[in-house]
Amino acid sequence: MKFNTKAIHGGQENVDPVYGSVMPPIYQTSTYSQSTPGGHKGFEYSRSGNPTRTVLENSLASIENGNFGLAFGSGLAAIDAVLKLFKPGDEIISTNDLYGGSYRLFTRIFEGLGIKFHFIGMRETDGIEAYINENTKMIWVETPTNPMMNIIDIEAISVISKKHDLLLAVDNTFATPYLQQPLDLGADIVMHSATKYLGGHSDVVMGNLVVKDEKLAEKLYFIQKASGAICGPQDCFLVLRGIKTLHIRMQRHCENGEAVAKFLRSHPKVENVYWPGFEDHPNHDIAKKQMKGFGGMISFSTKENTLKSATDILEKLKVFTLAESLGGVESLAGHPASMTHASIPKEERVKTGVVDSLIRLSVGIEDEEDLIADLKQAIG
Ligand SMILES: *Cc1c(COP(=O)(O)O)cnc(C)c1O
């Protein structure tokens, strides 16, 4: 099966053996009757498994070309489960330009539990090996990065992770499996905030993991059950519905993203535009190699480069909504320095390019003319 067919049918044979419903029933139940102690039909308690969740987990495995999918109560709950694979003394190498909440979870929770993190730039991969020692267990990659849209070469890093017997995990939230399939490029774990493009309609908070290896899957299923950060069946239904239109939504996100990026670049008041589709983007060639398109996420800074210049634009936008989050059908605008990345210290933040005037856009699937007209009136 190719991607579009998988998005609609992958992992979803016979979802309702009783009535043949096309969409899986929402099994809104905490428990399942047993005929004799231990005599159940595959499900005993909804923390360890729920049939609606299983359909979604199978769909996720299918669209990411993995073998096992896991759904959690949020993207961060999914990352939290990955980090519980490790013990005090273990070391993890992570991208330095990453989602603020991931950085907060790493430094404020897991560093305190004895795990050591090295945050490094990965635009060039040659520097990574210098940070590897006998305690290193995993490389954490986000690409495109949030919010600077840096592109990291997943395949090149997988060569390093395999050589040193490390896990390679990729946060694939921005690209989605429609644009990029990290397991095929050598990653071991793919993570998603399904809150974003997979759900796609800004109506659910959820996180996912997908892996190929059965032993790794067993460990993660154990953590999912033992720590219990699962999601409810209604949310699973919504994300499953979202996935069915992922491919057509992503096509439009890419088209609109390109139009908006080009408009911004031509605007006299705009300083830098960060979008991997530009030929002079530092890793454009890698983006072209590992992604099917360049997505709908764009960041830009103003020539004036003041907080006020960003606030003025954000307050004037009408079609774009000023809000946290991304990846829904509606266009959103955010201010990383005060919103998504406020938990990163200013010195760290500015080093990676998150200046006070930086605005991040999640370009939705409205008409491109309306989006550009809105930006025009707001930037002035
Ligand atoms: C939103 C986001 C997360 C966290 O996901 P939640 O569902 O909000 O917990 C992680 N990584 C990236 C890239 C994100 O955009």
Image (cartoon, rainbow, N blue to C red):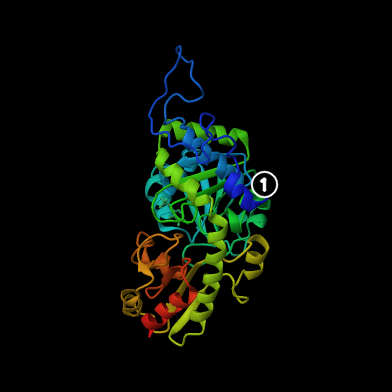
- Ligand 1 falls in quadrant: bottom left
Secondary structure under the numbered disc 1 in the rendered image: helix
* Residue at 51% in and 35% down: 54
Q: Position of residue 356 (x, y in %)?
A: 37, 73
Q: Residues within 10 Å of mark 1 (few under 14, many from 20)?
A: some
Q: Quadrant of the C terminus?
A: bottom left
Q: Which residue is mark 1?
A: 162
Horizontal side, residue 82 vs residue 155: left or right: left
Image label count:
1
Name the residue at the bottom extreme.
Answer: 268
Q: Position of residue 204 (x, y in %)?
A: 39, 50
Horizontal side, residue 122 vs residue 372: left or right: right
Q: Is residue 133 visible?
A: no
Q: Amino acid at mark 1?
A: Lys
- Image position of 113 with respect to 320: above or below: above
- Image position of 28 with respect to 98: above or below: above
Nearest the viewer among 208 and 120 is 208
Q: Is mark 1 within 8 Å of ligand 1?
A: no
Q: Position of residue 207 (x, y in %)?
A: 46, 46
User: Which quadrant of the figure has residue 376?
Assistant: bottom left
Q: Is residue 127 visible?
A: yes
- Image position of 288 with respect to 59: above or below: below
User: Which quadrant of the figure has residue 72?
Assistant: top left
Q: Position of residue 360 (x, y in %)?
A: 43, 69
* Residue at 60% in and 33% down: 215
Name the residue at the front extreme.
Answer: 19
Nearest the viewer among 81 and 58 is 58
Nearest the viewer among 315 and 200 is 200
* Residue at 36% in and 80% down: 378
